[in-house]
Amino acid sequence: MSFEPVVLSMNAGMICVVSQACEGHICRGLKITDEALEDRLAFDEIFVDYFNAFLELPAFCKHLQYDQLTGSFKVFNGPSMELDFHQLLPSQDAEAESKERERVTAWVKRERLPLFLKEKGGRGLRAVETEYKVTKVKAALRLYENKDQVMEMVREFEERAESLGHRSLVKDATKFAEDLGVNLHLKHPEPVCAVNSGEIIPSHRVKEVLKECVEEKLEREVRGLEWQGKLLIERKSDSQLCKNGCFSWLSKWKSCPSYTIAGAFEIYEQLLPTKLYFSKKTHTSCSGDVKCRLCGHAQESVPHILAGCTALAQNKYLFRHNMALKVLFYEILRDQDLLEEVPPWYSPVMPKPVYKSEQVEAWWDVPVYADHQEVRANRVDARVVNHVSKKVMTIEMSCPWISNREKKSEEKTMKYGPLRWELKEKYKGYEVHQYNIIMDVLGGWSEETEISVQSLVGRKTTHVLERMQKAVLSATLNIARTFKVVT
C-alpha cells in the first residue's frame, strides 16, 4: 500500500504540513499495546496495511512485512522480497517455526513498535492516522450499503461482536467518525452520517464531508499552536498568495528527497536552532542575548537567517536568487531563439552576460550606462530587447521573507524608475516594461508574479514557476543547513 500526497489546493496542501505541526500519529486513539498488537495484525487488514508501510520505511536497514496468511513477519532487503536467511531460517519442524515466529514478533515489539507508538516516544506514520480512520468509516458504510446476502451475515457478525464488547468494524468506525466530527447512523441499506450542524449526509457524499471535517479540524489545531503554527496561519491569511501553487511541490515534485520535505517542515514549524528559539520556545537560554551569531546585528530568528542576514547576502542569498531567475531567463532565451536547449533547474551552469541575434538582444546582470541623466540603480538582473516587436523587458528577481513580497515589489518598482525612463530615451518608440518576479524563501508567489511570468513565457508559466520553486526551496534549505553547521 503506497501513500502519496495529492495537493490540489491551499487547504489540501496545508493538511500535510499541518499534520506535522500537530504531531498526528496513526496510533493515537487506537490504544495498541504489546499484547493487542498480535490481535490487530491477525484480524485488522487495514491496520496491517498501514503497519507494513511503516515497517518498510527507508529509515530502517532491515525491512519487514507482516503476512496475514502465515501469521509471521518476512524480512527482506528490497522490492524483490528476498528473504534474509540470517534472520529467518526455513524449517520443517513446526515447533521450530513457531519459536522463530515468536522470536521475530518479540523483536518487532522491542525494536519497531516503540517507534510506532506515540506513548512510547515514537512518531509512527505521521499524517496517515486520519487516512486510516477515514478508510475504516468508508468500509463500514460500504458494508451497510451492500445488499448481498453474504454481507448480511458479516453485518450480523460485526454487530454481535460489538454487543459482546469485542473489537468490531462497526465499533471502530463509529468511534473514528466521532473523532472526525461526524456521527454515523449505520442502518441497512441506507447508512447516513450527521454533522454537528444537524445536516444529514447520504453515504455517497460522506467522503467529501469527511475531507472537509479533516481540514477544519487540522486548521483549528494549528491555530492553537502559537509557535509552530505561526507561519501556516500567515500562509492561510495571505490574500496576495497564489494558493494553488504554494504547496504544489509536495505532490508534483515526484523525486523530492525526504530530507528536503523534512527540512521544509522544520522551517514551517520554526524549529531551526536559533537563539530566539532557545530563548522564547524552549527557554533553555538564560543569557538573554539573541543577537545573530553570523552578522551580530538583528535578532537571530528564522526570518532573519533565511532572508535578512547581511553575512549571507553576498553568497547564499545571491546563489538562491540566481538559481531561480536563470530558470525563467533560459526559457525566455529559448523562446527568442537565442538558446537551443535549456539546462535543468539544478544545473550549476549560469547564463552568459550577453546573448545577441539580429532581432533580439539579452543581458544577464549587465549594467546600463546612462546617456541622458544620472542613474544610480542601473544594474537590473536581466533585460531583453526585441527589435522586431519594439519591446524592452527588464526583469528583477527577489526572494524575501514570506510577509515581505508586496513590499519588495514596490521597492523594485520605485528603485528602477529612473532606469526605465533612460531606456525609453535610449530606445525611441519602444515599449519599456519592468517585470518584478518575487518568490519568497519558501517558494510562494503572488498572483501578480504569476501574471508577470505568463507575460514572459506564456503557456509554460506553471512549469517555469514550479522549477523556480524547487530551486528556491533547495537553496533555502542549504542556507538552513549552513547555519546549523556554522553555529
Image (spheres, rainbow, N blue to C red):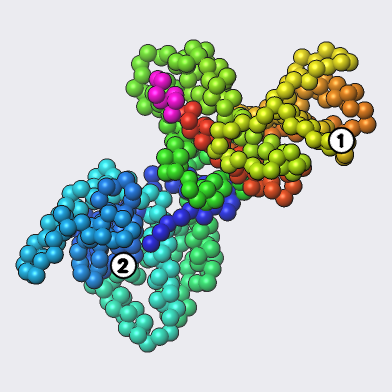
**Residue at 61% from the left image edge and 35% from the top image edge:** 324
Question: Looking at the rendered structure, which numbered label has been put on residue 387?
Answer: 1
**Residue at 43% from the left image edge and 74% from the top image edge:** 142
The residues colored magenta run 481-487
Q: Nearer the viewer, mark 1 or mark 2?
A: 1
Compared across the picture, whether 3 is left or right of 249 comes to left
> Magenta residues: mostly which secondary structure?
helix
Compared across the picture, whether 81 is left or right of 222 comes to left
**Residue at 77% from the left image edge and 14% from the top image edge:** 376
Q: Secondary structure at mark 2?
A: helix
Answer with mark 1 or mark 2, whichever residue precedes in sequence: 2
* Amino acid type shown at disc 2: Glu
Question: Looking at the rendered structure, which numbered label has been put on residue 45?
Answer: 2
- Asked which quadrant contains residue 391, the reply is top right
Compared across the picture, whether 227 is left or right of 363 comes to left
Q: Is residue 74 visible?
A: yes
Q: Using the image as rendered, state which of residue 160 and residue 20 is in the foreground.
A: 20
Q: Using the image as rendered, state which of residue 36 and residue 155 is in the foreground.
A: 36
Q: Secondary structure at mark 1?
A: loop
- Asked which quadrant contains residue 328, the reply is top right
Task: Provide residue 347's location: percent of width, then percent of height.
Answer: 56, 37
Task: Provide residue 223's location: percent of width, then percent of height.
Answer: 50, 41
Compared across the picture, whether 285 is left or right of 410 comes to left
Q: Residues within 10 Å of mark 1 (few under 14, many from 20)?
A: some
**Residue at 42% from the left image edge and 13% from the top image edge:** 289
Residue 77 on the magenta segment: no
* Amino acid type shown at disc 1: His
Q: Is 308 rendered above or below residue 98?
A: above
Q: Residues within 10 Å of mark 2 (few under 14, many from 20)?
A: few
Question: Looking at the rendered structure, which numbered label has been put on residue 485?
Answer: none
Q: Using the image as rendered, state which of residue 483 and residue 194 is in the foreground.
A: 483
